[in-house]
Image (cartoon, rainbow, N blue to C red):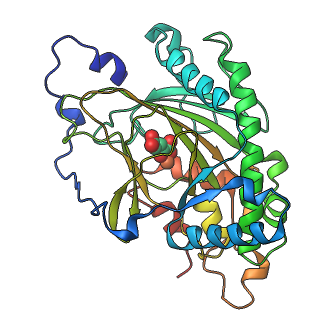
Amino acid sequence: MISVKSLAESPNLTSIPASYTFSNYDPTLLDQNQPEVKIPIIDFSLLTSGNPDLRAKVVTELGEACENWGFFIVTNHGVPESLMNSAMDGCGGFFDMSEEEKLEFKGKHVLDPIRCGTSFNALVDEVLYWRDFLKVLVHPQFHFPKRPSGFSEIALEYSKRVRRVVRGILGGISECLGLEEDCIFKSLNLESGLQAFVANLYPPCPQPELAMGMPPHSDHGLLTLLIQNGISGLQIQHNGKWVNVNAIPNSFLVNICDQLEIFSNGKYKSVVHRAVVNKSATRMSLAIANGPSLETVVGPASQLVESHPPAYIGMKYKDYLELQQSSNLNGKSMLDRVRRL
Ligand SMILES: O=C(O)CCC(=O)C(=O)O
Ligand SMILES: [Fe+2]
């Protein structure tokens, strides 16, 4: 299968091949001027400031963001802007390598440590998505392509710094759920948690109204932290409508994922999101997906099923991942498979 990058670079491309054309694409957007589309912003520095009043305030805001949105923007997180920029540049360098060079990483299985490819789940996609990707497992074991030179070192440092931010956010979320601060970290074995470095490339598309960058989906882990190259394209579903997400410079776009919905016994929902493409600019995003350890059986936290019966069955995270990749999912059907109600 050829990359979208090489397709988009073909001379005089004015229309997209039928294999990329969605006939039932629903672009309905929420009016962005409505007051309800103020995406929550969480100031991370207040979580770690050591001031209990400020922390309590931001924990409350975090709880509201998780409950009402499943999505929020994190500012003042302490990851250097230069490191974020270098990580994005490295992704660009990787996608710029020749098709032959990238062929070495044409993995198939969801747990292959380094995989690059195109579309979403090319084995089952009926229509192809306007997206190339690189997915690397960077924790508990660090893997990474050797080229472009220097990228691996940057990715190692970036992944570590992101884990620190994730730990801080999950500490706040644990408290929002009425649990000890380190409850999620410990019960889901984040010391050996699975972390994936996912770079997405969306080249300019001559007919963006007919193509999709990524289908509506929810992420399988606990929290995904995303940055982008200054070009928007992420949309999240909120109260049944799509909302454009515009990032604040130097911030993380954070979404709640399936394992956190399960662990919270459905109090916090895994947000459905998608990526749209545009005509003029190449968009890149870098998503760091953070999950439990592969061997952890994730079910609703025992403390949360005293007042509400468990709404999900427990499943080993590894089994959840493999099942999800093996089927063609529309939206959230993998979560439906573990939902009891
Ligand atoms: O590119 C984006 O904004 C979305 C990426 C995404 O949803 C993912 O990698 O799971
Ligand atoms: Fe995603």
Q: Residue at x 32, y 27 (%)?
A: 281
Among the 4 quarters of the image, the one containing residue 145: top right
- Left or right position of 220 against 245: right
Residue occupying the point 82% across, 55% down: 189
The reply to whether residue 145 is visible in this rendering is yes
**Of 251 and 204, which appears nearest the observer?**
251
Residue 305, x across and y down, in percent: 72, 84
Residue 105 location (% of width, % of height): 56, 20
Q: Which quarter of the rendered picture does the N terminus lie within?
A: top left
Q: Is residue 318 above or below residue 285?
A: below
x and y, in percent, of residue 122 in the image: 40, 35
Please report the residue visible at 44 percent of the width from the left and 11 percent of the height from the top.
99
Whether residue 196 sits left or right of residue 157 in the image: it is: left
Specify whether residue 238 is in view.
no
Q: Measured from the top left, where is residue 45 in percent x and y?
A: 73, 53
Question: Can you say whether 237 is above or below 231 in the image?
Answer: below
Q: Furthest-bottom residue in view?
A: 307
Q: Is residue 9 left or right of residue 166?
A: left
Looking at this view, is 54 or 68 the one in front? 54
* Count of labels in the image: 0
Q: Residue 160 sits in which quadrant?
A: top right
Please state which of residues 131 and 36 is positioned toward the viewer in this rendering.
36
**Quadrant of residue 7 in the image?**
top left
